[in-house]
Image (cartoon, helix red, strand yellow):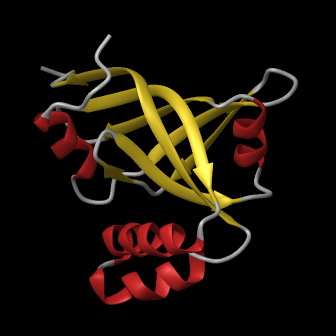
Amino acid sequence: MPTTFTEEQRAFLLHGTRTGKLATVRKDGRAHIVPIWFTLDGETLVFNTGERSVKAANMRRDPRVSLCVDDETAPYAYLVVEGTATWTSDLDELLTWSTRIGGRYMGEARAEEFGKRNGVPGELLVRITPTKISFEKDIAN
C-alpha cells in the first residue's frame, strides 16, 4: 500500500482551496465526517481543530482516520488517505501552521489574521501520517 505522496498527488492535494472531508469514528461506532482546511508538511497532512471538538474527542479515543479530497469538476478525481492522527497544543507550531493554512484558504493578505485566530490555547495541531493512499483521476473519461 502506498504511504507516500507522488508529485502528482501532492499537486492534486494542494491545488486551489479544495477541502478535505475528515472521517473519524464516534464512541458508539457511527461515522463522523466534517470538512477541514489542510496543507502538507512532508508526508503528513496538517490541520487544526478545537481541543473540545467531536473530531478531537474521536481521535483521542481512536487515532485512525480517513480523509477524502475530491475534484468536483469533470473529468473528476479523488484522493483518499487512511492514516493515524497525532496532535500537539504547542503554540508556536499552532501559530505557524494556522497561518500557512489560513494563507492557503483565505489568501496571503489574511494569513496572519487566521493564524492569530486559530493558533491559540484551546486549539490542536493535528498531523495525519498515511498508512494507505488511494488516488483516482479522469473518472468520467
Give left or right: position of 82 versus 50.
left
Instruction: Give me the residue at 42% from left, 73% from top.
Output: 96
Q: Quadrant of residue 43?
A: top left
Quadrant of image for the N terminus: top left
Whether 117 is drawn above or below 59: the answer is below
Q: Residue at x 48, y 79 (%)?
A: 115
Question: 76 or 89, which lies in front?
Answer: 89
Q: Is residue 6 above or below residue 98?
A: above
With 113 as the anchor, is 14 left or right in this view? left
Q: Tell how many labels.
A: 0
> Residue 6, relative to residue 105: is it above or below?
above
| Percent coordinates x, y for residue 128 in the rendering | 48, 39
Give the answer, above or below, for where 31 lies relative to 52: above
In the image, residue 91 lies at what x, y percent?
58, 73
Residue under the point 56% across and 59% down: 48
Determine which quarter of the picture holds residue 104: bottom left
Q: Give x and y (percent) for residue 9.
A: 20, 35
Residue at point 65%, 31% (across, down): 63
The quarter of the image holding the C terminus is top left
Task: Specify the farthest residue to the right.
Answer: 28
Whole-percent x and y of residue 17? 32, 59
